[in-house]
Amino acid sequence: MSDLPPGWEWTTLGEIGEWFGGGTPSKSKPEFWTDGTIPWLSPKDMGSEKLGRTRDHITSEAVDRSAVRLVPDDSVAVVVRSGILEHKLPVAQVPFATTLNQDMRSVVTYPGVESAWIAYYLRSAEQEILSECSKRGTTVASIDTSKLMGFRVPLPSTAEQRRIVASLEDHLSRLDAGKQILDKAKVRTKRLDRSIVSSALQGELAEPSAADTPLPTYLNSIAEYRQIRARGEPAKATGTIEVSVPSWWAAVSLATLSRRIQYGTSAKATVNDDGASIPVIRMGNIQGGAITNESMKYLPASHPDISKLLLQDGDILFNRTNSFDLVGKSAVYRDSHGPAVFASYIIRCQLVPAVNPDWISLVINSIFGRRYIEAVASQQVGQANVNGTKLAAMPIPLPPPEEQDRIMYAVRQLADSAERGLISIESARKAAEDVRRSLLAEAFAGKLVPQDPSDEPASVLLERIRNERAATLKTKRGRHKKQETT
């Protein structure tokens, strides 16, 4: 923006107010922190556009005996050193007096310059500031303070600043109210996912049918198949397990439904893919109940593990070792992923016919499955483990095979509907952000509210600020000189 409306002037951030830096009083001195009442602002507090409080407080003794300075109320705080500066410039109005840590800068604007005007402009120019004022070659993203002080700011009269800020706050408050509604809708939609799974496990998504395979017949066919075909480790059935299920279902161990439960390869995979290599699915490739192809590693096609561990359509992959929160995450492998094997931190479970693998994966990934995993997981040095034996003993609610298919169809339909809802919500949020950016652009181009020709020009305001600064500096120099002579 080069041309300004009549009566506006360009100035710099360094000219519009007094800037304050910060520091951290020694943590080894309890008298600086214990029972402190003076706010101490740091980047972790910068979560809203207008702050209500800080998490940490220091004592008046810390202010007297350390590098921190007390910033008067009605300041504008900016983060100048933090990883978040890679993509965002946190800015907040601070209505209360505070101190700062060394990663912050704060400005108290001179009379005639509204703090809200500066805060809104900093947010509107976020990407420009990050581009022009960032330090290069630092280990942590940082803002060059001298460049920040020289960053240009458009300045209208005080009266026009106030009119524009009032209009912005009116428009943005309505946008924020809309965003809050969207946020609540997003939370409800995510809860719907859990509700869908809960309803599925309670038999509420599909009605039983007289045409379904009778459960005793179904269980007998599973037992007969396992007796003839089951192989691998460990696939010993453990019988019926006491779990609350609908009256026309059964509850059996996963082993009862499996013909093979098998650990993956411990061979060292590499990132090299010669076009004939076979991908190795690792625990990082199981995300949100699905298999991803991010950061794949490979084994040569000639490796001896390939033939015995090649995945088949419908195999369930279970992550047996991970953090406590992530251990047990599972997904179903499909032929559409292409040929692949699986790593040692994953267990493959191959089911007997007429058991829907998507149903089993749903159960494992549900709150029901999560509770079982958390109950049986062993922990060592920050890692949790669920071995093949414990996986085999997991209780599985089992409807007739036809009902499994009907339930999974209903789950997919409802999940697709929820996903469309989330997409719509995100689209609406993006539209709100576009409107916000447009409002800020209009504001700082002087197009948001009508101008008043009777307003004092910004040139007069700036001249007054410069004269007052010069007078203040002259007074300070006089005091300093007097102290030296005495």
Image: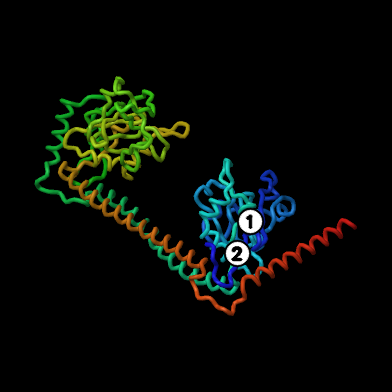
Seen from this angle, which residue lies furthest front?
3
Query: In this image, 60 relative to 396: left or right?
Result: right
Residue mark closest to the camera, 2 vs 1: 2
- Mark 1 highlights which residue? 149
Q: Residues within 10 Å of mark 1 (few under 14, many from 20)?
A: some
Quadrant the C terminus occupies: bottom right
- Mark 2 highlights which residue? 10
Quarter where residue 332 is shown:
top left
Quarter where residue 223 is shown:
top left
Tell me the kind of residue under disc 1.
Answer: Met
Seen from this angle, which residue lies furthest right?
486
Going from N to C along the chain, the mark reached first, 2 or 1, is: 2
> As rendered, which of 429 and 261 lies closer to the eye?
429
Please determine whether, in this image, residue 403 is positioned above or below residue 377. below
> As rendered, which of 138 and 424 lies closer to the eye?
138
Classify mark 1: helix, strand or loop. helix
Tell me the kind of residue under disc 2.
Answer: Trp
Q: Residues within 10 Å of mark 2 (few under 14, many from 20)?
A: some
Query: In this image, 467 relative to 381: left or right?
Result: right
Indicate the position of residue 314 as horizontal and vertical percent values. Answer: 23, 35
Indicate the position of residue 206 as horizontal and vertical percent values. Answer: 18, 50
Residue at screen point 66% across, 72% down? 460
Please determine whether, in this image, residue 454 is positioned above or below residue 329. below
Query: In this image, 271 relative to 307: left or right?
Result: right
Indicate the position of residue 258 as horizontal and vertical percent values. Answer: 23, 31
Indicate the position of residue 346 as horizontal and vertical percent values. Answer: 34, 31
Seen from this angle, which residue lies furthest left?
211
Quarter where residue 300 is shown:
top left
